[in-house]
Image (cartoon, rainbow, N blue to C red):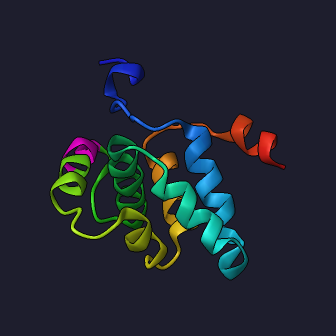
Amino acid sequence: MTAKEARPMIEISPSKVVQVIFLSREEAAGESELWAFIDGMNSEEKAHLTAIAWVGRGAFEPEDYLEAVETAFVQATTPTADYLLGMPHLGENLEAGLEALGVDVSGEEEDLL
């Protein structure tokens, strides 16, 4: 199996995840913008964003990513933005999740700086 075949299909652009990471670092100053940004995503993107955060905090292993996405869909009983904004270390979890899933976002990070 090649590395490309091993990587799960992530249905959110890396640039959107990086935007969430940057906004989460602004803490209270960026909270309303972050909430609106996440709330504006479609349900697929929200589920994948949540799954990436779960992989990053160790709730799911990278190889169980698709299960994490399905769980995010099933357990979405509160607005995703509310749930994620209540998650301690959201930015760090997303960074760790992207890294664990083998997603290189260095280009997206440079674009935001």
**Residue located at (18% from left, 55% from top):** 71
Quadrant of the rendering where the N terminus is positioned: top left
> Which residue is at the front of the view, 95 or 78?
78
Give how far across and how far down residue 42 sits, in percent. 39, 43
Q: Is residue 20 above or below residue 91?
A: above
> Which residue is at the front of the view, 46 or 51?
46
Q: Is residue 87 above or below residue 16?
A: below
Does residue 20 appear left or right of residue 67 in this picture? right
- Majority secondary structure of magenta residues: helix
Q: Quadrant of residue 30?
A: bottom right
Does residue 20 appear left or right of residue 25 in this picture? left
In the rendered image, residue 23 lying in the magenta stretch gets the answer no
**Residue located at (35% from left, 61% from top):** 54
Residue span colored magenta? 63-67
**Residue located at (23% from left, 41% from top):** 66
Q: Is residue 58 above or below residue 107?
A: below
**Residue located at (49% from left, 64% from top):** 93
Give how far across and how far down residue 113 sits, in percent. 84, 49
